[in-house]
Amino acid sequence: MLITHPKGLYTIKYDSARKVVYEAPVGLWTKEDYAEYHSQFENKLGPAIAKQPWAICTDLRKYKISDLGEVMAKHVEWLSDNNVKYSAMIVDSAIVKMQINRAVGVKIPQQAFLNETEAEEWLKSKGF
């Protein structure tokens, strides 16, 4: 399954064989953009995943930080409630990688990487 935003704000791809969602947000988002993105998870990915254990790999290298804490928290809650087990994030700097890897209080075990290969190896080591 491949979902793309009409204006290019994201791509979401679900690999049903590995049970991994790959997503790549782009640019600066509004609350409305994030709500529309979240609806793709609720309406399309949720039924495909069917609460089976799964993982997510997010390429953040083209995403601009947006002040969307409230709607992002709702999305993370949905991910947790729908059985996501691990979150791999691809970032563009060692500093961001360090900050993400030191984050505490997250609901989903996460790890940041500087490239796709490292992220894939980590997900495979977790069974995905």
Image (cartoon, helix red, strand yellow):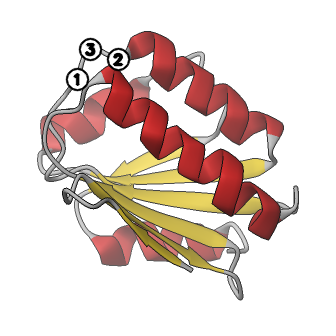
Question: Circle 3 — which element?
Answer: loop
How many residues crowd mark 1 within 10 Å: few (<14), some (14–19), many (20+)? few
Question: Which amino acid, mark 1?
Answer: Ser
**In the image, 102: left or right of 79?**
left
Q: Amino acid at mark 3?
A: Asp
- For label 2, the SS is loop
Q: Tell me: residue 79, above or below residue 125.
A: above
Q: Residue at x 23, y 32 (%)?
A: 29
Q: Residue at x 66, y 61 (%)?
A: 44
Q: Quadrant of residue 107?
A: top right
> Is the residue 28 above or below the residue 113 in the image?
above
Q: Nearer the viewer, residue 7 or 86?
A: 7
Query: Which mark, by number, is residue 68?
Result: 2
How much space separates mark 2 and mark 1, taking CA atoms?
6 Å
* Residue 101 visible in the picture: no
Percent x, y of residue 101: 40, 35
Numbered mark located on residue 67 in the image? 3
Residue in view at x 44 percent, y 23 percent = 103
